[in-house]
Amino acid sequence: MSAAQTTMQRNAISLYAKTAHKKAARLLGYALILGDFDSWEAASAIWQARLTETERAALAWAAMRSLDEDHAREVAYTVIQGAGAPLPPFISPMDEASFWADIASESELKAYALACFNRLSKRDQRAFLSHVREAA
């Protein structure tokens, strides 16, 4: 593609693309450059706010089609099924728990939160509930 064609294409995008689409495309660039979990998580949240469900589905479809079948299945399973069981703590239990919670599904969060709460002593349950009420 020549420099003139590239400039025309860039101008067409500037003129005709919706603002939300331009911001979503820019965000893709940032996430690719940074390449870490937090960047992709933020991109996901912002795309949810700015793009329609159909647009997000098309984006996911295109990305999944670019993967080989085994990798696509693994990614889909991870998204749908969540993080699985938390790993044993390596250095700090709170750091490991926070990392796991960042990638866990909502159903996993609820299941583990309830199971952990139920295993606490009555005194620790009261302290936990007091902490949660203060935070709310």
Image (cartoon, rainbow, N blue to C red):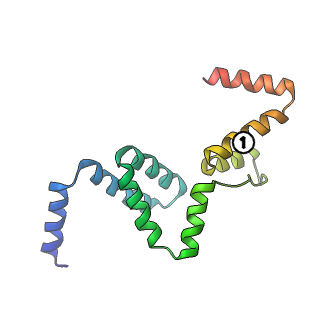
Tally the numbered discs: 1
Residue appearing at x 75%, y 55% in the figure: 87
Residue 37 image offset from top left, x and y in percent: 54, 56
With 136 as the anchor, is 61 left or right in this view? Answer: left
In this rendered view, identify the residue nearer to me: 80 or 27.
Answer: 80
SS type, badge 1: helix
CA neighbours of label 1 inside 10 A, class few (<14), some (14 to 19), many (20+): few
Residue 18 image offset from top left, x and y in percent: 23, 50
Q: Which kind of residue does numbered mark 1 sit on?
A: Ala
Q: If the image is split into quadrants, where does the N terminus sit?
A: bottom left
Residue 32 image offset from top left, x and y in percent: 43, 63
Q: Is residue 44 above or below residue 71?
A: above
Residue appearing at x 29%, y 53% in the figure: 21
Q: Which residue is mark 1?
A: 111
Residue 103 image offset from top left, x and y in percent: 61, 51
Q: Residue furthest right?
A: 121
Q: Residue furthest front?
A: 54
Q: Is residue 115 above or below residue 61?
A: above
With 69 as the anchor, is 56 left or right in this view? Answer: left
Residue appearing at x 50%, y 51% in the figure: 41
Residue appearing at x 75%, y 27% in the figure: 128
